[in-house]
Image: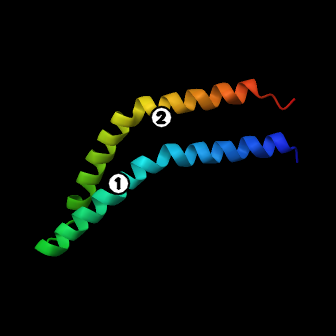
Amino acid sequence: MDDALIDMTREALLTALVLCSPILLIGLLVGMVTSVLQAMTQVHDQSLSFAPKLLVMLAAFSALLPWVMQNLTDYASHLFSTSIW
């Protein structure tokens, strides 16, 4: 396999990891906080854990969208400038 193709695949995976990790970490933290609150109050309803995670992750995604698009644009321009042919 060509080294350039391996490097491009590695960069794609790293870019995907960097772009997804902030939103996933925020969802993880909100899920942990709601789980602790549910355990303390002994209220175990599935919608009480799903709704806050959904709302906070949507807010985080909309706040991080310019950064995500800038990184994707930079990666795409780097990808098109590096030709493997």
Q: Callout 1: 10 Å neighbours few (<14), some, many (20+)?
A: many
Q: Return the disc, 2 or 1, that comes first in the chain's sequence.
A: 1
**Separation (CA) of disc 2 from disc 1:** 17 Å
Q: Callout 2: 10 Å neighbours few (<14), some, many (20+)?
A: some
Kindly identify the amino acid type of the residue bearing the numbered disc 2: Val
Q: Looking at the image, which is closer to me, 47 or 17?
A: 17
**Residue in the image at 54% along x and 32% along y:** 71
Kindly identify the amino acid type of the residue bearing the numbered disc 1: Gly
Q: Looking at the image, which is closer to me, 47 or 30?
A: 30
Q: In which quarter of the image is the C terminus?
A: top right
**Residue in the image at 77% along x and 28% along y:** 82
Q: Is the Cβ of the residue at disc 2 closer than 8 Å to that at disc 1?
A: no
Q: Looking at the image, which is closer to me, 14 or 52?
A: 14
Residue at label 1?
Answer: 27
Say if residue 46 shows up in the picture: no
> Under tag 2, what secondary structure?
helix
Q: In this view, does 24 lie above or below 73?
A: below
Q: Is residue 80 above or below residue 44?
A: above
Residue at label 2?
Answer: 68
Q: Where is residue 25 in the image (x, y as percent from the top left)?
A: 39, 54
Q: In this view, does 15 lie to the left or right of 20?
A: right
Which of the 4 image quarters holds residue 62?
A: top left
Q: Position of residue 56 (x, y in %)?
A: 28, 47
**Residue in the image at 14% along x and 71% along y:** 43
Q: Where is residue 64 in the image (x, y as percent from the top left)?
A: 39, 36
Q: In this view, does 80 lie to the left or right of 67?
A: right
Q: Is residue 66 left or right of residue 17?
A: left
Q: Position of residue 72 (x, y in %)?
A: 56, 32
**Image disc number at residue 83:** none
Which of the 4 image quarters holds residue 39?
A: bottom left
> Under tag 1, what secondary structure?
helix
Say if residue 38 shows up in the picture: yes
